[in-house]
Image (tube, rainbow, N blue to C red):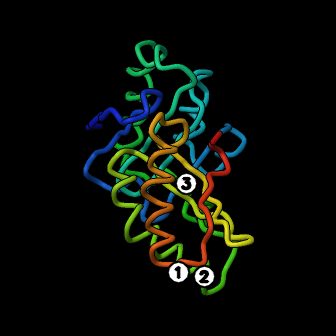
């Protein structure tokens, strides 16, 4: 049975069952075309109100375009997630790479990715979100906010006062941390 939780982002809801939805990885889908590897994501994205679905091992976060639409679509989205969870099939096909894996490599990239994984991911995940390391260029770290983090009213504060301070503490050469999908 799916358990529903509110997140700090009023547009997002976090769903969990206590059982894994996928073996590993974080999978982010914005359109039905993006979701070819996930039947459940395709079904949820059929709702015009759905802006994003994030599938992780222990939770699924669905983000709508308007908070008021939760009243309209919550029961049907929950039914779809329950149906797939009850079938106990992975929410994402195993034969695709994790689209949230960083495309860049190198010592600095690996160090910062490790910091995010160890210090940021557990806290962010508890709120239905995920932070993806995109790039490091000219001593600026570029992140993508996903799940409940994308569009969250407190995302800029978390980014600057939390994540940026953490990264700059451990890697003093970093000048700034920016989100590629956040107006600052």
Residue at 51%, 61% in the rendered image:
164
Measuring from the top left, give residue 139's x and y in whole percent: 68, 72
Mark 2 or mark 3, which is nearer to you? 2
Q: Which residue is mark 3?
A: 27
Note whether 43 is above or below 144 in the view shown: above
Q: Quadrant of the C terminus?
A: top right
Whether residue 88 appears in this view of the structure is yes
Residue at 67%, 37% in the rendered image:
32
Note whether 151 is above or below 38 in the view shown: above
Distance Cα–Cα, label 2 vs label 3? 24 Å
Measuring from the top left, give residue 53's x and y in whole percent: 53, 40
Per the rendering, the mark at residue 184 is: none
Whether residue 96 appears in this view of the structure is no
Residue at 53%, 27% in the rendered image:
64
Per the rendering, the mark at residue 111 is: 1
Q: Residues within 10 Å of mark 2 (few under 14, many from 20)?
A: few
173, 53: nearer the viewer? 173
Distance Cα–Cα, label 1 vs label 3? 22 Å
Q: Quadrant of the N terminus?
A: top left
Per the rendering, the mark at residue 108 is: 2
Note whether 78 is above or below 90 in the view shown: above
Distance Cα–Cα, label 2 vs label 1? 5 Å
Query: To which quarter of the image does residue 84 belong?
Result: top left
Residue at 38%, 71% in the rendered image:
118
Q: Please report contact status of discs 2 and 1: CB closer than 8 Å, yes or no.
A: yes
Measuring from the top left, give residue 79's x and y in whole percent: 38, 27
156, 123: nearer the viewer? 156
Per the image, label 2 sits on a secondary structure element best described as helix
Measuring from the top left, give residue 173's x and y in whole percent: 60, 78
Per the image, label 3 sits on a secondary structure element best described as strand
81 vs 183, left or right, is: left
For marks 1 and 3 on the same chain, the one whose residue lies earlier in the sequence: 3
């Amino acid at each position: 049975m799916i358990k529903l939780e509110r997140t700090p982002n009023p547009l997002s809801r976090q769903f969990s069952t206590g059982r894994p939805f996928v073996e590993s990885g974080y999978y982010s889908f914005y359109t039905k075309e993006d979701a070819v590897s996930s039947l459940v994501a395709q079904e949820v994205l059929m709702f015009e109100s759905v802006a994003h679905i994030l599938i992780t091992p222990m939770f699924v976060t669905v983000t709508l375009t308007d908070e008021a639409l939760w009243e309209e679509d919550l029961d049907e989205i929950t039914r779809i997630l329950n149906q797939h969870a009850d079938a106990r099939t992975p929410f994402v096909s195993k034969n695709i790479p994790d689209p949230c894996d960083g495309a860049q490599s190198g010592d600095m990239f690996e160090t910062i990715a490790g910091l995010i994984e160890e210090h940021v991911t557990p806290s962010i995940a508890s709120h239905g979100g995920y932070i993806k390391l995109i790039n490091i260029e000219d001593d600026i770290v570029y992140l993508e906010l996903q799940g409940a983090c994308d569009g969250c009213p407190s995302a800029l504060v978390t980014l600057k006062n939390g994540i940026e301070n953490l990264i700059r503490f451990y890697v003093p050469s970093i000048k700034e941390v920016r989100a590629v999908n956040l107006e600052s």
